[in-house]
Amino acid sequence: MIHVYAFTESLRDLPQIDGLAGARIERLRIDEVDAVFSRAAGRPSVATVRRDALAHGAVVEALRECSAVVVPVRFGELLPDDAALNASLRERLDSMRDNFDRVRDCVEIGVRVYDGETVIERSRSGTDYMRRRARCESERREAVEDLNRRLGTLSRDTRARTDPNAVAERERLVGAYLVQADQVDAVRAVVDAFAAEHQDLTIVCTGPWAPFSFVEQAA
């Protein structure tokens, strides 16, 4: 079977990295578009899925360093043989070029904001306590929504949720931001300033990554 990692444009050389289970990575090129893949005996097992997912991600990130644009493929998608890979790539050349244009010169930055401990000053009554707690909740929600808006102004595209009731572990923001490479420092500066101003919240910023969240998946 064929395990596809990504499609790339103007790939100079394959990176010196092993694929899943130590397999050699290969490429198929059609019209300056490369499908980067390795050969697999079968689907990842429950026992190896975490290891294999990390290996998949490592190959994608390595490709980002040696090609003009990378369109990642979702982990776990397989094709039966070389003929199917060839047909898949030929059928998707136009959509691949659209994807390349969508993410060109950009990386993905991930930002998550988690609730911290809510500390309410001593209240005169239960009503006063609930009023103070509601005000704290409102201030946190508005601050996180403002952070998302500010990051959005620095991004070409965003994928974000800001409803703490819709996600696990009281995550107030789960955001992915498609950022031009020359704007990464500006994005980090906004996140760092927010973290300094809101020490009652936990902020996790990751990346830059290949733009997994901003491409039409194809394999």
Image (cartoon, helix red, strand yellow):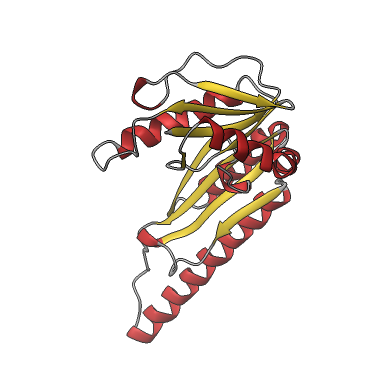
Question: Which residue is at the far left?
Answer: 47
Residue depicted at 51% across the width and 57% down the height: 173
Q: Is residue 128 left or right of residue 12?
A: left
Quadrant of image for the C terminus: top right
Instruction: Give residue 53's quadrant in the image.
Output: top left
Q: Is residue 61 left or right of residue 50?
A: right
Residue 204, given in percent of the width and then of the height, sits at 46, 44
Residue 202, given in percent of the width and then of the height, sits at 43, 50
- On the question of residue 209 being in view, the answer is no
Q: Is residue 106 left or right of residue 164?
A: right
In the image shown, does 192 or 177 lie closer to the viewer? 177
Question: Which residue is at the far front?
Answer: 83
Residue depicted at 48% across the width and 50% down the height: 112
- On the question of residue 191 being in view, the answer is yes
In the image shown, does 187 or 76 lie closer to the viewer? 76
Residue 184, given in percent of the width and then of the height, sits at 65, 35
Instruction: Give residue 34's quadrant in the image.
Output: top right
Q: From what the image shows, is residue 162 above or below residue 199? A: below
Residue 56, given in percent of the width and then of the height, sits at 44, 32
Q: From what the image shows, is residue 99 above or below residue 159? A: above
Residue depicted at 42% across the width and 33% down the height: 1
In the image shown, does 26 or 10 lie closer to the viewer? 26
